[in-house]
C-alpha cells in the first residue's frame, strides 16, 4: 500500500468545499475593494530558492511557484510599464517544509497595493489593515487577534550601529524568540551592547492597547524611531474606532518575522489557540526597485491551508456555516 | 484533551527535581498524590492548568507543536534542538557548564595535537560549533548518557558534557579542560499560544517567573 504523506494533502469533501467557499468569499471581498486578480504561472523559470520544488523541463531547470509575491513581481515588471494599483491572487504555492508538520502544497489568497516610489503610503497601509480586519468575519472565525508591527523598529537601530551580519542575525534570532537575555548574549563585547539590549527590552515590554507605543520611550533609539512611532500611532487611531466585534488589535513591537523582506508596517492575523498565524503581510518597498522598477508595495496573504487545518482540529473556533 | 486545559511541560530529572519544590505553596503547586504515582500528567493547585512530566530532549517538541503552552527546559537542550519556540526568561537555576572533559593529566594541548581526536557527547551541535571555532576536527561519538565512561574504556579521548558540581567527573577520574558554554533553566512558550492568547498565558508566565527565577 502506498504511504500517504500529509505533506501533499488530499482534500476530502468538507475541506474541498470549505476551500472553494473561502477562496470565493475572500476574492469577492478583495474585488469589492478594487483589487483585480492576476494569475502568475504555476511554473517559474526565475532564480529559485533552496526550498522550491524543482524539476527539469527538458534541459531547463524550472520550479513550481513557491511564493505569490515573487511570482507576481516577475509578472508585473514584465507586463506593465506602470503598476496596477491593486492586485489580488488565489491558488497554491509549493515549498519544502521547514517544520515536519507543514504541507508542501499550500493554498493562499492575497493582495498587493502598489504605488510609484515616493508617493505617500500611510493610507495604503491603513487600507490593507482595514481589509485584513474584515477577513475573520468573512471566514466565520468567532474571534481573532490582529498584530500590528513595524520592521524598521528593529532594522534601523541595527543599521545605525553598523552591526556585522552574524551579530545582526543573532540579535534578530533572539528577538524572534522574545528572549532579551539572548540579545544581551549576542551583543557581548560590542560597544553598542547596552543600547541594543535596552532597545530589545523596550520592544519586548508587554503593554496593552495604545499604551504599547509608550514602551518606545524607554529605548535609546526613541528619537531615531520617531517617524515609525508616529506611523503606528496614526494607524492605531484610524483602526481602533472601526474595530469589528470580536477582533482584538495589538501592537507587536518585536515582530521580526520576514525582517529581511519587510521595510515598514507589518500585519499578522491570529485566532486564539491557533499555533500559527493565519494571515500575514506588510510593506516591502525594496522588492520592485531590486527588479528595476521605481515602485513601492505592500500586501498580505491569507494562509488557507492553515485555516483548513484549524477548521479540522478546532471547529469550535468557527461559526457554523450558513 | 479539552482545549480549555492549559498544559505546562516540566522536565524529569535533575532540573525537574530542582523546580518542583520551588512551586510548593504557589497556585502552580503540583498535586502531591499524583506526583507519588507514575502519572505523567499532574494536576496543579489551579483548575484548568496541568503539568506534563517529559524527558528534557522531548520537551521542546511538545511546546513547539503547541501541545504544551509553556515549558521549562535547560538552554543546552534548546541550543541542540533549535525548535521554533519563544524563550521568555532565563530562570537562573540549574546552572551548569558545557565542558570538554578528559582524564586527569591529559591537557587541552594534548587533545589538540591528536591526529584523530574522538569526542563522546550528546551535544553534537555545540561540540561542532566549538570545533569549528577552534579550527579542529574530531570524530564525534554519539552517546545519550553515562558519557563519563567513554574515556575510561577507550571509546573516546574526551567527552563534552554538562558539569554542575564536578562530583561525577571526579568519581571517574576526569577533569574539565575547556568550557564550551553555560546552561540554565529557561521558560519557553509555544509561539502560537503565547501570541494568540495573551490574556491566558502572560499572567501564568509571570507567575512561573516570580516563583522560579533565582
Image (cartoon, grey):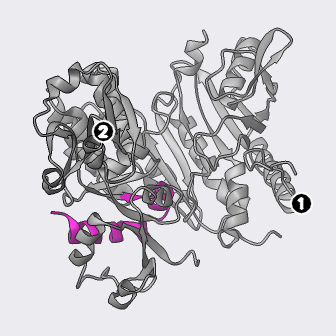
Chain of residue at mark 2: B
Q: Which residues are magenta?
A: B188-214
Instruction: Kindly report the secondary structure that dominates the magenta region of the rendered protein.
Output: helix
- Residue B142 located left or right of residue B166: right
Which image quarter is the C terminus of chain A in? Answer: bottom right
User: In which image quadrant can residue A55 be found?
Assistant: top right
Task: Please name which of the two marks, 2 or 1, marks the residue nearer to the observer.
Answer: 2
Q: Residue at x 33, y 66 (%)?
A: B205
In this rendered view, identify the residue nearer to me: A191 or B184.
Answer: B184
In this rendered view, identify the residue nearer to me: B130 or A104.
Answer: B130
In this rendered view, identify the residue nearer to me: A195 or B83.
Answer: B83
Q: Where is residue A133? Give x, y as percent.
A: 60, 53
Q: Which residue is mark 2?
A: B154
Q: Is residue B120 one of those drawn in magenta? A: no
Q: Which residue is mark 1?
A: A13
Does any portion of residue B150 appear in the rendered image? yes
* Residue B9 marker: none
Q: Where is residue B158? Give x, y as percent.
A: 25, 37
Amino acid at each position: 500500500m502506498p504511504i500517504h504523506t500529509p505533506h501533499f494533502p488530499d482534500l476530502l469533501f468538507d475541506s474541498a468545499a470549505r476551500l472553494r467557499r473561502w477562496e470565493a468569499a475572500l476574492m469577492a471581498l478583495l474585488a469589492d475593494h478594487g483589487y483585480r486578480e492576476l494569475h502568475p504561472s504555476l511554473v517559474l523559470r526565475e532564480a529559485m530558492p533552496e526550498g522550491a520544488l524543482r524539476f527539469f523541463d527538458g534541459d531547463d531547470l524550472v520550479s513550481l511557484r513557491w511564493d505569490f509575491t515573487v511570482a507576481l513581481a516577475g509578472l508585473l515588471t514584465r507586463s506593465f510599464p506602470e503598476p496596477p494599483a491593486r492586485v489580488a491572487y488565489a491558488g497554491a504555492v509549493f515549498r519544502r517544509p521547514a517544520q515536519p508538520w507543514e504541507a508542501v502544497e499550500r493554498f493562499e489568497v492575497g493582495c498587493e497595493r502598489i504605488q510609484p516610489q515616493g508617493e505617500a503610503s500611510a493610507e495604503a497601509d491603513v487600507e490593507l489593515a482595514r481589509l485584513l480586519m474584515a477577513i475573520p468575519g468573512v471566514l466565520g472565525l468567532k474571534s481573532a487577534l490582529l498584530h500590528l508591527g513595524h520592521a524598521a523598529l528593529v532594522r534601523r537601530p541595527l543599521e545605525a550601529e553598523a552591526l556585522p551580519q552574524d551579530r545582526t542575525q543573532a540579535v534578530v534570532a533572539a528577538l524572534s524568540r522574545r528572549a532579551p537575555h539572548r540579545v544581551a548574549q549576542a551583543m557581548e563585547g560590542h560597544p553598542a551592547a547596552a543600547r541594543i539590549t535596552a532597545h530589545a527590552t523596550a520592544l519586548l515590554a508587554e503593554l496593552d492597547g495604545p499604551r504599547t507605543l509608550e514602551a518606545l520611550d524607554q529605548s535609546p533609539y526613541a528619537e531615531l524611531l520617531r517617524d515609525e512611532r508616529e506611523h503606528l500611532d496614526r494607524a492605531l487611531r484610524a483602526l481602533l474606532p472601526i474595530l469589528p466585534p470580536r477582533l482584538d488589535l495589538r501592537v507587536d513591537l518585536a515582530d521580526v518575522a520576514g525582517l529581511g523582506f519587510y521595510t515598514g508596517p507589518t500585519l499578522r492575523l491570529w485566532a486564539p489557540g491557533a499555533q500559527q498565524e493565519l494571515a500575514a503581510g506588510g510593506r516591502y518597498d525594496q522588492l520592485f526597485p531590486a527588479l528595476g522598477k521605481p515602485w513601492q508595495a505592500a500586501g498580505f496573504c491569507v494562509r488557507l491551508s492553515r485555516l483548513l487545518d484549524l477548521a479540522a482540529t478546532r471547529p469550535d473556533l468557527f461559526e457554523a456555516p450558513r | 484533551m479539552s482545549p480549555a486545559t492549559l498544559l505546562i511541560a516540566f522536565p524529569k530529572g535533575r532540573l525537574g527535581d530542582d523546580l518542583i519544590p520551588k512551586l510548593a505553596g504557589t497556585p502552580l503547586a503540583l498535586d502531591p498524590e499524583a506526583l507519588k504515582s507514575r502519572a505523567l500528567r499532574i494536576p496543579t493547585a489551579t483548575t484548568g492548568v496541568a503539568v506534563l512530566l517529559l524527558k528534557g530532549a522531548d520537551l521542546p517538541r511538545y511546546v513547539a507543536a503547541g501541545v504544551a503552552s509553556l515549558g521549562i527546559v535547560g538552554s543546552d537542550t534548546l541550543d541542540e534542538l533549535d525548535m521554533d519556540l519563544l524563550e521568555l526568561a532565563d530562570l537562573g537555576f540549574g546552572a551548569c557548564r558545557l565542558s570538554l572533559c578528559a582524564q586527569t593529566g591529559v591537557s587541552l594541548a594534548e587533545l589538540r595535537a591528536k591526529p584523530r581526536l574522538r569526542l563522546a557527547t550528546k551535544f553534537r551541535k555545540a561540540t561542532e560549533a566549538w570545533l569549528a571555532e577552534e579550527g579542529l576536527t574530531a570524530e564525534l561519538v554519539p552517546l545519550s548518557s553515562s558519557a563519563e565512561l567513554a574515556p575510561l574504556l577507550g571509546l573516546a579521548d574526551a567527552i563534552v558534557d554538562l558539569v554542575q558540581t564536578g562530583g561525577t567527573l571526579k568519581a571517574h577520574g576526569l577533569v574539565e579542560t575547556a568550557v564550551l558554554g553555560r546552561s540554565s533553566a529557561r521558560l519557553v512558550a509555544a509561539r502560537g499560544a503565547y501570541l494568540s492568547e495573551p490574556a491566558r498565558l502572560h499572567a501564568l508566565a509571570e507567575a512561573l517567573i516570580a516563583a522560579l527565577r533565582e
